[in-house]
Every structure is written in structure tokens, then in C-alpha cells.
Amino acid sequence: MPSPSEVLAPRVTAAIAAAFGDDYPELRDADPVLRPSQFADLQVNAPLALAKKVRMPPREVAAQILVHLDLDGIAEPAQVSGPGFLNITLADSWLAAAVAEMAADPRLGVARQPTENIPIDYSSPNVAKEMHVGHLRTTVVGDALARTLERLGHHVIRQNHIGDWGTPFGMLIEHLLDVGEDSPEAGLLESDPNAFYQAARADFDRDPAFAARARARVVSLQAGDPDTMRLWSEVVDLSKHYLNRVYDVMGVALTDADLYGESRYNAELAALCDELEAKGIARISEGALCVFLDGYTGREGKPVPLIIRKSDGGYGYGVTDLATIRYRANDLHGDRIVYVVGVTQALHFQMVWETARLAGWLPDGARPIHVQIGNVLGKDRKLLRTRSGETPRLSGLIDEAVIAARRVLDEARPDLAEAVRAAIAPQIGIGAVKYADLSVAHDSEYVFDLDRMVALTGNTGPYLQYAAARVRSIFRNAGLDPTTEGAGGGRRRIVVRDAGERDLALALLEYGSVVAQTGDELEPHRLAAYLFDLAQAFSTFYEHHPVLKAEDAELRESRLALCGLTLAVLVEGLGLLGVSAPDQM
């Protein structure tokens, strides 16, 4: 369902074409420059932009457009305002009908887009290591994008590019053999992978014999020795249990079926290097096979290499990432190929993708996109660290968030049963962390402040969750089921009579457009900002407009319908962000 702006835009463009298109053909598809207005619902700013072109004062341009502007059935007659704006106030009847149509739509006005294949790379932790704060944003942002793109009708292929290969596996396998495959120490790979890794590392650093065995095991691993491969698989499988537990707690839609680690490409790397060298794209430099691309220089103007094969014969990330983009473009037939990865990898990805195009592995129709992820900061505005200076564990941050949410619940709602508060606290705490991350642009930094995140006021996840819970309480008090009021169930007649109802109706009608923008631009903060604005519009509406005690039955039915649709949009919108909406708070 188009938003009011999307409904009006072609009509304004047609009026501009009718007014000036004969003399200025390039204006037949002019941008109407529609913006919100403090004096109306929308204003047309195009007259100011066109005045110089058509050599008229802006107000005269606006008057000429107004002559040809057909808003019949949609809006009140437009008014020329200020230096040359056109103010447009939508008709109450049109607003009411549009909101009623949205309430009756199972998709809540979210149009299904032409389907694209979209592989999306996110989370990507290392095997046998705990996920840390650095994995928070890629996991949360990637999950929200995957959910949103699926809602828009795309075929999303989740790709969890885990670090499941490399020299550390020599010492990990040897440590597994030393402690015993069925020992409690081996179980640390599921419960505390950092402890297992650190113990292996300590053995490697302390015991030369262990280090020699570990190096020999790497050689066996790279040669595909069957017993070594079995042990490697065991290490990976035990780590999967840990990863799945973290994803389950966080409510992240990643499973074993989405795992496409570095090891997936091992068999292709040698041939890939040979092909790059045969095509003249890669050459030997100081013993390593490298690609040197025009325009990529470092300090003192020296060329920056993309290392394909190291001087010791080992393969670097460059060749693995080349194999990955080739697979996603040619085997998965990706249209948009999305990488939700830290901003520091931008140069690396640019070089990988340019190399892939030179090699003919990246078709013109395939578009790789780097969704750059910014850092999480502490209150000192430096990279978030523990008191001991270490990188915080992701599970530890989640636990702290749940504790903080429980504290807020205990203070705000001591009347709720203990079991209810215990069930709600994880939803609020985890939702608070996710929303705080998603409410800022993905490439910007933000401060991890739990007290602010779990607050019930302000632009926070709990504030939105509380807004949804408050709507549910209205229906509980009425003895009605809110799920029958929106997302295809809305059958009540809606009327729009005053500013509060208008503002809520206008906010609701933007939902489909915002979801589309979020998917098109790959920017979840757009949806987060919209949901906050909607919650604020509902709060103002609820404060000044009695629902169950409305003046008459018609108004009561209408306001119940607006409440039901608001709840449906809040619940679905939060769900697209991966945030749950508790029944009560």
C-alpha cells in the first residue's frame, strides 16, 4: 500500500508536466519534492527548485502547478504558502478509508517486491572462541535485514561464514586428544570455548613437544588426513552447540543449515590461484602470489597487494573471499550479495570484488554490497572493554541486560507475578540491546549504556514494547482479541475527526513505505525510527482520546480499530528487527 506521499507524488509530477512540460520537456518527470509540513500534512517544495529553470517567481510557479493539480477525493484544495510552497491537507474521508484498507490487508500495506536472490553474510564468529561484543552488531543488523528482506518477498540465503579452518586447529585438535574427546574439558567447547582455546594456547606456548605435534597436525589437516578431519569435525560440531545456544537466547534466525565457513572453499583455492595467475591478474611478489589493482596505494604511494597465496604456500583471507563471492554470484545466483561486516574491511572487500570482476567471476547483474558495521563504545567513548581490559563476551553482555531489565521491572511492576517478571525480563533485556544497536545507523559508533537501553522512556526498545503492551491491555479490558483487529482482521469502521486521530492515521500509513526503504537501503535504523515515531503518535492519541469510554459507539469502534492496527504494526515491525513484544509489562 503506497504512503500518502507516494499517492500524491505522481499527481504533483503530472501537474508540473501539464504546467511546464511543453516548454521544458525535462520537467515531465520532475521530482515534486514532497516533505512534511507544520501547517498541513505535506508540502510541495518543487516550485522553489523550479523557479530559476522556468524564470518565474516561486509563488507564481506554485500557482501554475495548482491550476493543474488534481487532488479530488484525496485531499482538500491545496494552498500556496510562504515563499512558494504548496500545502496539502489530506481529506479525513480518504485517510479513514486508507487506514481501513490497511487494517484489512494481511500484509499491513507492505508490498511484495519483485523477488531477488540475496545471500547475506552476517555474524561469522570463529570456531572454538566465544562470541564477543564485536559480533553483536553484525549479528543483530544482519538478522534484521534478513527478516525485512524476506518480508518484502525476496529469497534470502543466510550465510554464516564462520572461521572453521586454519593453523589454530592444529593445537585445538591436539589439546582435544590430550584431555580426551569425552572429557569435561572437551565439553568446554560447548560451554566456555574461550577456556578451551586458552588452555590449548597455553600448552602450545609452554610445551615444545606439544607445539611440534600441533604443527604436524596442521599439515595433516591441510592434506585431508581422515582421522584428523574427523577430529576437526568434532571440534567444529561441539562449537556449533555453543553458537546455537547463543543464537537461540538472542532470538537470531541462524541455524546449522546457514553455516558456510571458510573450509567450504578449501578444494577450490589452488585452482583459483592458478586461474588468476594464468589470466595475468595475479603475480608473484616477494614469494607471495598477489593481485595489484590500479588506484590502491598505501604509504609513500606503494601499491597495496591483495595477497592470494602467502610465501609459505598457505592461503590468506583474500583467496577465500574470492572463492566466496564467486560461489554466491554463480552458484547462488545472487542479485544483491550483502556482507554485514565491520567498516575496517571496506578496502579489502573493494579489492576482492574488483579482482572477481576482472576474473569474470562477478556477472554484471550481481551487486555486492558492504553493510559497514561501526564500533560499540564504552561510556568513555573508547572501544568497549571489561574492567580488566578484555573484549566483553557477548553472552555476558546479554546476561547483564537481562539483569538490568529485571531490576527495572521489579521497580516499575512489583504487582506482576514473579513468574511473569522472570519470563518478561529476557524479552525486555535482549530487546533493549537489539533496539539500541538498530536505532543508530549501522556504520556509526554508539555507546553501550545499559541503564539508558532498558529505560521505559525515550527512544528505547522497552518504550516500544510498553506501547504494544498498553494496547493489549485496552483489548483485555474490553474482553476482545486484538489479533482480530489488524493484519487482515480489521473489520471495524474507521473515522478520522481530529488532530490526534489524523496524526496516528498518517503514521500508520507510512509503514509499508518505511519497510520498503529499509530493505532497499539496507538500513534498519529507518524502521526503528519509524516505530518510535508511531509509538509517540499512539501515546499522544491515547492520552487525549478515550477508547473504551469514547463519546459514542461509532467512535469507540473506530478507536479500537486504530489501536488494533497500531498493535499489529508495532508487533510486526519489532519482529522484523528481531525484537519480541511481551503481552504485558
Image (cartoon, rainbow, N blue to C red):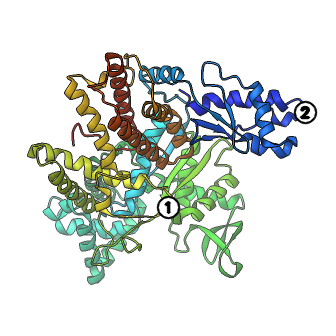
Note whether 241 is above or below 163 in the view shown: above
Which quarter of the figure has residue 176? bottom left
Residue found 77% across the figure and 26% down from its top: 67
Could you say where residue 287 lies in the image, as x and y percent from the top left?
A: 60, 76
Return the residue found at the far right.
23
Q: How far apart are marks 2 and 1 (CA)?
A: 46 Å
Return the x and y of residue 89 as percentages of the image width and height: 59, 30
**Helix, strand or loop for disc 2:** loop
Horizontal side, residue 221 vs residue 326: left or right: left
The mark total stands at 2
Residue at the image position 64 percent from the left and 54 percent from the top:
356
Tell me residue 568's x, y (percent). Answer: 36, 31
Amino acid type of the residue that numbered disc 2 sits on in the rendered structure: Asp
**Callout 1 environment at 10 Å: few (<14), some (14 to 19), or many (20+)?**
few
Q: Is residue 419 above or below residue 126?
A: above
SS of the residue at dot 1?
loop
Q: Where is residue 387 in the image (x, y as percent from the top left)?
A: 27, 76
Mark linked to residue 23: 2
Amino acid type shown at disc 1: Ser
- Give 184 or 400, whichever is nearer the viewer: 400
- The numbered dot on residue 77 is none
- Decide if residue 16 is on the left or right side of residue 348: right
Of 584 and 477, which appears nearest the observer? Answer: 477
Position of the C terminus, as image quadrant, is top left
Q: Name the residue under label 1.
A: 444
Measured along the vertical axis of the image, is residue 100 above or below residue 572?
above
Whether residue 516 is visible to the viewer of this picture, yes or no, is yes
Instruction: Estimate how packed mark 2 is, as few (under 14), some (14 to 19) or many (20 or more) residues with alpha carbons within 10 Å.
Output: few
The answer to which image quadrant residue 559 occupies is: top left
Q: Is the Cβ of the residue at disc 2 closer than 8 Å to that at disc 1?
A: no
